[in-house]
Amino acid sequence: MIGHVEVCCGRAEFREHQKQILSRNLSGLFLPVSFINKGQNVIAVYRAEGFCPLDHYPVTDAGRALDIVICLINKMIRAEDHYLFVGDYRISPDLIFVEGPFMDMPVLDVAMIWKQGDGSAELSRGLQEVLYLLRQQCASGGEYLEIAARTASCRFLGLRAIKKRFCRLRDEIYENLSG
């Protein structure tokens, strides 16, 4: 786990309303952040206490992996209520942090670091990258994450439709484990 993450970027990386929403942590999708203006650059200092990078989070099964992704999607849906839309920011495994590295506790929180996105392809491409990383980490159920990645590749699906399909897939995983 880490205490904070500093990211230096150009002033164009953030629109003023985005900085206001992010610094007040209104969306919940992004780690709490403070901004420092330094010449033509902005230093974003993210508070990451209690979080660890996604690639260091111990995931042993596909159900747990989908719990993480569903939590992320829920927050992405809420972020849209605060005018932070998919495509405005990048979705990438190296930008995602998970709270609590313990296998016996539920995922308490998932948050991201803001990086400027490049449009609507972010959702499909980003979720696929996250799912592929989680598949590499999982000891069991990788075939379910392959199905989830194929679902995420359907560009005509929105956040809510993807979430619904992922929830069904997760339920199937847990039914197969208990049955």
Image (cartoon, grey):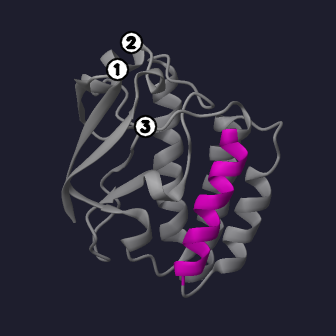
**Residue carrying label 1:** 19
The residue at the point 50 percent across, 23 percent down is 84
Residue 150 x %, y %: 79, 59
Using the image, tell me which numbered label, if any, was put on residue 151: none
Q: Secondary structure at mark 1?
A: helix
Type of amino acid under label 1? Lys
Q: CA distance from mark 3 to mark 2?
A: 14 Å
Q: Secondary structure at mark 2?
A: helix
Question: Is any atom of residue 174 visible in this view?
Answer: no
Using the image as rendered, state which of residue 86 and residue 19 is in the foreground. Answer: 19
Type of amino acid under label 3? Trp
Give the vertical position of 106 relative to 36 (above or below).
Answer: below
Q: CA distance from mark 1 to mark 3?
A: 10 Å
Furthest-front residue in view? Answer: 39
Q: Residues within 10 Å of mark 1 (few under 14, many from 20)?
A: some
Question: Is any atom of residue 28 visible in this view?
Answer: yes
Residue 4 x %, y %: 20, 50
Q: CA distance from mark 1 to mark 2?
A: 5 Å
- Earlier-in-chain disc, 1 versus 3: 1
Q: Residues within 10 Å of mark 3 (few under 14, many from 20)?
A: many
The image quadrant where one finds the C terminus is: bottom right
**Residue carrying label 2:** 16
**Residue carrying label 3:** 114
Magenta segment boundaries in residue numbering: 122-138
The residue at the point 34 percent across, 39 percent down is 8
**Label 1 with label 2: CB-CB less than 8 Å:** yes
The residue at the point 74 percent across, 39 percent down is 121
Type of amino acid under label 2? Glu
Give the vertical position of 17 relative to 132 (above or below).
Answer: above
Using the image as rendered, state which of residue 99 and residue 19 is in the foreground. Answer: 19
